[in-house]
Image: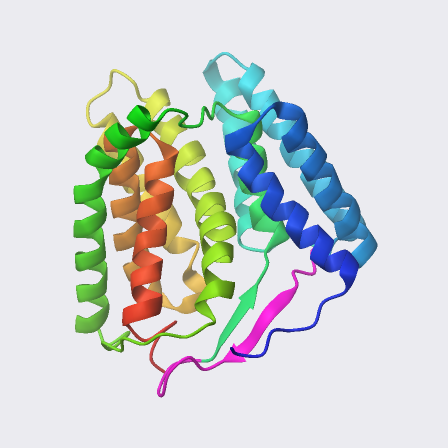
Amino acid sequence: MPHVEPLSAAALVAIAALFATVVALWIRPWWVLLASLMVAEITGFVSGILSGPAGIWIVGLAMAIWNFRRVAGGWQRALTFVGAAVMAGLLAVHAMSGFQNPIVLRTVVLSPGALPYTQYVNFDKTLAGVLVLAIGWFAPLRSGADWRTALRSAAPIAGVTIVVVMAASLALGFVRFDPRWTPAFWVWAPINLLLTCVSEEALFRGFLQREIDQGLTGRPHAASTAVATSALAFGLAHIAGGWLYVLLATLAGTGYALAYQRSGRIEMAILTHFAVNATHFLLFTYPGLA
């Protein structure tokens, strides 16, 4: 197992509470979600992961989303949507102060020729995604029948997305075929699924795509405009990796957006996202060729 960075007991409790908060989105009742969120925030401040300004941004985003929900329509709704989207987006790209996201894997080289990889536990992005889902209109899948229906509708899109994204990555020289097993997967996978994929899909599909689609209801190409906008925004959010990465992320984001649009379920966008990431991690150079 690659070396896992040592963390304080308070930081470990904060990270565990952050995971519990995400899981609580599906198990409810609401007080379980609220309790785990409060524990994550309190221990986050105690451990030094969060500092003063973080509280301002968390409360500010919660108020912005709540205010957006209360506005019926017109320019006020558009203005509150933009405000909430900008604040959530800035948290997602780590542009707001007050967050010292802990590192659990530092500069690990997973295979010869790969770029070094550092794994963070991103409190800012995750809390933004949790607030979007918790305060927004998210209704989790409950029954086995609903899960099966959603999976049947999204599975073909997920399969095509994996093939297209990885083929494009190979063709553009971003990765090479490099199947391997590493115990680091057990550190990477829960963080990627429950923190990265849930938060990014909450922001780009559950909020941005959904609201654009709803706002353009009755107009031509409403669904395609919402898909394209969320995919492009998702790609641009990865600009730190360079323009090639933006292109590949936009391509992947299109698949996630289509899975969401076809199934109507955020869970299907999350699972499609994780399936692409896990395929990349296990079968190709990760995160990319040096």
Colouring rule applied to residues? rainbow
Can residue 98 be seen in this snapshot? no
| Residue 60 place in picture, x, y as percent | 68, 35
Q: Is residue 212 left or right of residue 222?
A: right
Q: Is residue 9 left or right of residue 290?
A: right
Foreground pick, 120 / 215:
120
Q: Is residue 4 above or below residue 45?
A: below
- Looking at this rendering, what residue extends furthest in the bottom direction? 112
Q: Is residue 92 left or right of residue 271?
A: right
The stretch drawn in magenta includes residue 157: no
- Residue in view at x 47 percent, y 26 percent: 138
In magenta, the rendered stretch is 99-115
Can residue 41 be seen in this snapshot? yes
Please state the total of marks drawn on the protein image.
Answer: 0
Foreground pick, 130 / 20:
20
The stretch drawn in magenta includes residue 112: yes
**Quarter of the view holding residue 110:** bottom left
- Residue in view at x 44 percent, y 27 percent: 140
Per the picture, the main secondary structure of the magenta-coloured stretch is loop
